[in-house]
Image: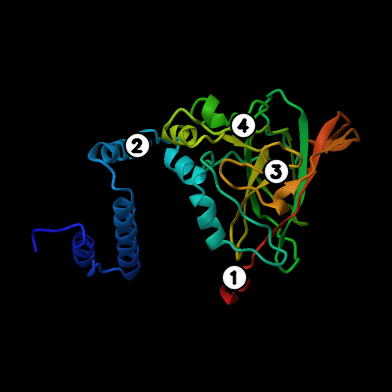
Amino acid sequence: MRDYSEQTLTQAVLDRIAHAPDPRTRQMLQSLVRHLHAFVRELRPTEAEWATAIDFLTRTGQMCDERRQEFILLSDTLGVSMLVDTINHARGGATTETTVLGPFYVEGAPAVEPGADISGGLEGEPLFVEGIVRSSDGSVLANATVDVWQSDDEGHYDLQLSEPGVFFLRGRLRTDAEGRFWFWSIMPRSYPIPVDGPAGELLAAAGRHAFRPAHVHFMIAAPGHEKLVTHVFVKGDEYLDSDVVFGVKDSLVAEFERRTETLPLGGGRIGRPHRYLRYDFSLRNEREQSAA
């Protein structure tokens, strides 16, 4: 067939991909074609509108580089990232809930010692963070890797401000024999995601704000366990109920307490006023995951 109609074109495209060798690829392509064609038939865009849509996606790709991932921002703000997270990481029992990775994760963050200050000398309210990493059976996980990253006192990440390879408010720790980790930082702040690209244009067109509530990111991994990607959010933040990327879960909201008592720092003691976060994490054992 050469002359396709609005009614016959979709099936013709489906027929062309019916013999894709990988079954999962075939399934995904066929579903994409069916839904995309149905979307176009429902909205009946003009050619100019469709050109605008293609230009939007083109500019989204052009905004991406090693320090900026506009497609992640687009996925996050449309709720797709959290939908994928929810499908893949439905939690139960004692395991810590997951949330979105976000666009500011960096592979190969600098290794830091327990008790280190990851603030890089930036101004801000001192924050002491500690916790224990456990398996879902309750046993502690020694030598687990704990990646942490966060915004500064003005809501910026190092990738937005520093030269490539210059990191602050970011680090990778290892848990000790009792599964413990601890470090110093500064209080994170709520912040707007970058709005100078297509994702920001879409938010403005929808009449939405661009803010995320204050949080600290954690990525925790241990042999034999499912990697955990999550945040801990600051209790009382004004954007907890309207996070632009839909990432807040009640179990991930914690008190960042105001304290003045002495705490260890670098082998010594320090008694400066600070905020304090204690949060323990539980990773799902892969055997448990397979059984589910």
| Residue 193, x across and y down, in percent | 54, 34
Quadrant assignment for the C terminus:
bottom right
Residue occupied by mark 4: 191
Q: Which amino acid lies under the numbered mark 4 shown in the image of this protein? A: Tyr
| Mark 2 nearby-residue class (10 Å; few <14, some 14–19, many ≥20) | some
Q: On residue 289, which mark appears?
A: 1
| Residue 220, x across and y down, in percent | 63, 53
Residue occupied by mark 3: 233
Q: Which amino acid lies under the numbered mark 1 shown in the image of this protein? A: Gln
Q: Is residue 67 visible?
A: no
| Mark 3 nearby-residue class (10 Å; few <14, some 14–19, many ≥20) | many
Q: Is there a contact, CB below 8 Å, between mark 1 and mark 3?
A: no
- Quick one: SS at disc 2? helix
* Residue furthest out toward the top: 123
Mark 3 vs mark 2: give the one in front: 2
Question: At x 50% / y 57%, what residue is drawn?
Answer: 84
| Residue 242, x across and y down, in percent | 63, 41
Disc 2 to disc 4, how far (Cα)?
24 Å
Depth check, front residue: 188 or 86: 86
- Quick one: SS at disc 1? helix
Disc 4 to disc 3, how far (Cα)?
13 Å
Residue occupied by mark 2: 56
Q: Is there a contact, CB below 8 Å, between mark 1 and mark 4?
A: no
Mark 2 vs mark 1: give the one in front: 2
- Give the mark nearer the N terminus: 1 vs 4: 4
